[in-house]
Image (cartoon, rainbow, N blue to C red):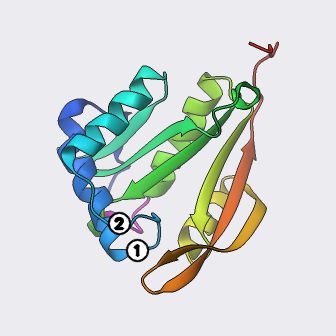
């Protein structure tokens, strides 16, 4: 990749590209603990729910091609967690290792700051050394390691939670 990808808010028109990236991840990696491909209707529901909740969904684009996507969503639904978001990002197989993931994660961190989140959490498969390294380079720290919590591809998988502390709101409230 000669230049950094353009990072922008996702639109409904991006959903087929987002779906293709996600389904490749589901089929070929342990980055998503999902066994069956999603449908376009499922991705539309996902997108609509995030947007209705005020959560960001972003894409990376290069020469008109969506090379990756990311989002921040609810970490836990109880009100006490309102200043915590959980992020997800996935990169198209042909664009991995080219800085797309870093660009998306940096943009998600900025979105989290804009939203005045206090902490940004990510759940990463323990075998995903590239993602764990990227998150560590950007200041995330491992806060939990949960052995054998998922089953995929005929084996047990360990989940690692990473967390980035952010400034948060200047005056947090209970509501």
Instruction: Tell me if residue 100 is in the magenta stretch.
Output: no
- Magenta residues span 95-99
Q: Position of residue 156 (x, y in %)?
A: 57, 82
In the image, residue 5 above or below residue 169: below
Q: How many marks?
A: 2
Name the residue located 22 percent from the left edge and 39 percent from the top edge: 14
- Tell me the residue that label 2 is attached to: 25
SS of the residue at dot 1? Answer: loop
Q: Quadrant of the N terminus?
A: bottom left
Image point (42%, 21%), residue name:
52
The answer to whether residue 150 is above or below residue 18 is below
Q: Residue at x 25, y 51 (%)?
A: 19
Instruction: List x then y, in percent, for residue 146.
Output: 72, 69
Crowd around label 1: few <14 · some 14–19 · many ≥20 (10 Å)? some
Q: Position of residue 74 (x, y in %)?
A: 58, 35
For mark 2, does the 10 Å Cα neighbourhood hold few (<14), some (14 to 19), or many (20 or more) residues? many
Q: Quadrant of residue 118?
A: top right
According to the picture, the residue beneath numbered tag 1 turns out to be 29
Are discs 2 and 1 less than 8 Å apart at CB? yes
**Residue 38 versus residue 109 in the image, above or below:** below
SS state under label 2: helix
Quadrant of the rendering where the C terminus is positioned = top right
């Amino acid at each position: 990749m000669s230049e950094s990808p353009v990072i922008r808010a996702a639109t409904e028109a991006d959903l087929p590209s987002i779906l293709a990236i996600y389904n490749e991840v589901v089929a070929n990696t342990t980055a998503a603990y999902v066994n069956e491909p999603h449908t376009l209707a499922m991705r539309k529901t996902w997108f609509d729910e995030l947007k209705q909740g005020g959560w960001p969904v972003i894409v990376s684009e290069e020469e008109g091609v969506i090379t990756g996507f990311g989002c921040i969503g609810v970490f836990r639904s109880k009100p006490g967690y309102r200043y915590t978001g959980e992020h997800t990002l996935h990169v198209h197989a042909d664009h991995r290792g080219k800085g797309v993931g870093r660009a998306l994660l940096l943009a998600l961190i900025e979105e989290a700051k804009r939203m005045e989140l206090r902490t940004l959490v990510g759940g990463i498969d323990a075998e995903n050394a590239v993602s764990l390294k990227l998150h560590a380079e950007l200041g995330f720290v491992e806060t939990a390691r949960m052995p054998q919590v998922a089953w995929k591809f005929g084996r047990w998988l360990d989940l690692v939670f990473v967390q980035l502390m952010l400034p948060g709101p200047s005056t947090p409230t209970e509501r």
